Image (spheres, rainbow, N blue to C red):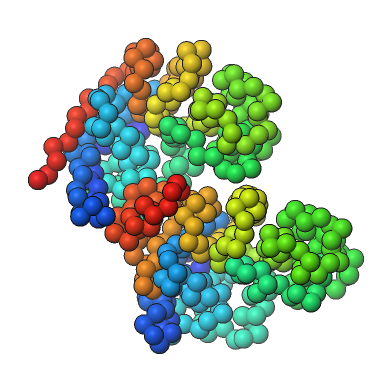
Amino acid sequence: MKMPPDAILSARDLCFDYGNGQGVRRVSFDLWPGDVLGIVGESGSGKTTLLKLLGGLLAPSGGSLSYRETSGEVLDLLALPEARRRHLARTELGFVHQNPRDGLRLAVTAGGNVGERLMATGSRHYGRIRQSALDWLTRVEIDGARIDERPTEFSGGMQQRLQIARNLVSGPRLVLMDEPTGGLDVSVQARLLDLLRSLVADLGLSVVIVTHDLGVARLLADRLMVMQGGRVIEEGLTDQVLDDPREPYTQLLVSSVLAA
Amino acid sequence: MQPILSLRGIHKHFIQHLRGGLRLDVLSGVDLDLCPGECVVLDGPSGVGKSSLIKAVYGTYRVDGGHIRVAGTDIAVAGPREIMALRRTTIGHVSQFLRVVPRVAALDIVAEPARARGDTPEVARDKAARLLRRLNLPEKLWSLPPATFSGGEQQRVNIARGFVVDWPLLLLDEPTASLDAENAAVVAELIDEAKDRGTAILAICHDGVLRARIATRLLPMKRVEQAA
């Protein structure tokens, strides 16, 4: 397939069928370094399924998915040997689940959760791993004194920030986020959004973020894709889609919120 | 002189699908050449499409016909990444209302476009501080997020953000609507200085005194006849 020379991820005609008419139908897009792409739409529109296809959590029934490594080498993600794919998933890719419990190891301490990805990439020096974990806990505004506690003792907002630290510690280039502020109180959401915004900008991450919250999309995303019934029905710059929506469904989405 | 902005035959309409497909024509056949150092003020009563034209030039509204050429790019057909690049390097925009970001300090909101264009954080914050001081925003507010500021204070943050970079093209939508005379005069000075540096400005300005001072010419606009 054709991949633009400077893109980091290219999807072409990705499909997935749950067998009940729902799924993802022929979705194509390119993602560039530092690019934040929001995917919006209602429940059942296929946005989380698409994210799972991108993250390798589901295997598409058709289409292609290419990823360009730092070296410039282009990988066919759908044909990658399992060991190579898992290595990639622990190093260059991040996946932030809506429910932090799906992305954390609950029986392991906060420090262990963050340090695990470093060990997976070959770090063996305990002191340095602990120090990195401590640095990242501080960066996501978790008190370092709680490094030896388990995530089950944390609030929902703290768990989500821990999941983010766990994903970012290995220095990923591409982070996939599924409703990262979904189950949180509004005040906790604002803090997490601001944190995500500054981390994404400071680290120059490429991000695909799924959200049904247009305010979140407005704040974080450069570009938006609107999904309905498994298809992308409208796309463009975030302000184009939200301030000048063209499709009937997008107009309905935009007019259904109070102020985005 | 070579225009920095060239508009030819701009058409824009909205189709309101939730209101039975109601069609609203807002721009029809707008032409304009804007050269460095010029300030063109859009002229006409409310509802003639002045804000829509500003939004079309910024790429927020997608037009249905015509060309919007800025620095070699036609915004009417450009992709999102080309428009983002122009917004980073070439086009500044002061909207009527500041879109506040939770927890980000006023000083950093102002400094952000300078940082995005390559200034170090220190240089960017220094420029931001000088502008906020000129616009008489009390220094004790600089480290606070503007969500709780008054309308006039938010507008001054917004203006400072627009002038923190020497943009080749600057779009101003009612920059002084909620300002007192003293601060409006500061904005007039900022506009004069930008013109002297060669910034081309496209503005909406209902304040007659300010408009007479800043406008090098007016672009008359009138309401578009609605298609039957």
The quadrant of the image that shows the C terminus of chain B is: top left
Q: Position of residue A81 (x, y in %)?
A: 60, 86
> Measured along the vertical axis of the image, is residue A63 above or below residue B167?
below
Residue A212, x across and y down, in percent: 48, 61
In this rendered view, identify the residue nearer to me: B129 or B86.
B129
Residue B47: horizontal and vertical position, in percent? Answer: 25, 32
Placement of B130 over or under A87, stated as above or below: above
Q: Nearer the viewer, residue A145 or B4?
A: A145
User: Toward which corner of the image does residue B160 lie, by quadrant?
Assistant: top right
Residue situated furthest left in the rendering: B228
Q: Decide: is B130 above or below B118.
A: above
Residue B36 is at least partly visible in this image:
no
Tell me the residue at 30%/51% (across/down).
B77
Q: Residue at x 50, y 72 (%)?
A: A48
Q: Residue at x 27, y 46 (%)?
A: B63
| Residue B2 lies in quadrant | top left
Q: Is residue B20 left or right of residue B156?
A: left
Q: Position of residue A255 (x, y in %)?
A: 36, 52
Residue A22 visible here: yes
- The quarter of the picture where the N terminus of chain B appears is top left
Residue drawn at the location 31% of the way across and 48% of the way down? B62
Q: Residue furthest right?
A: A127
* Residue A139 found in image quarter: bottom right
Compared with B127, A13 (above or below) is below
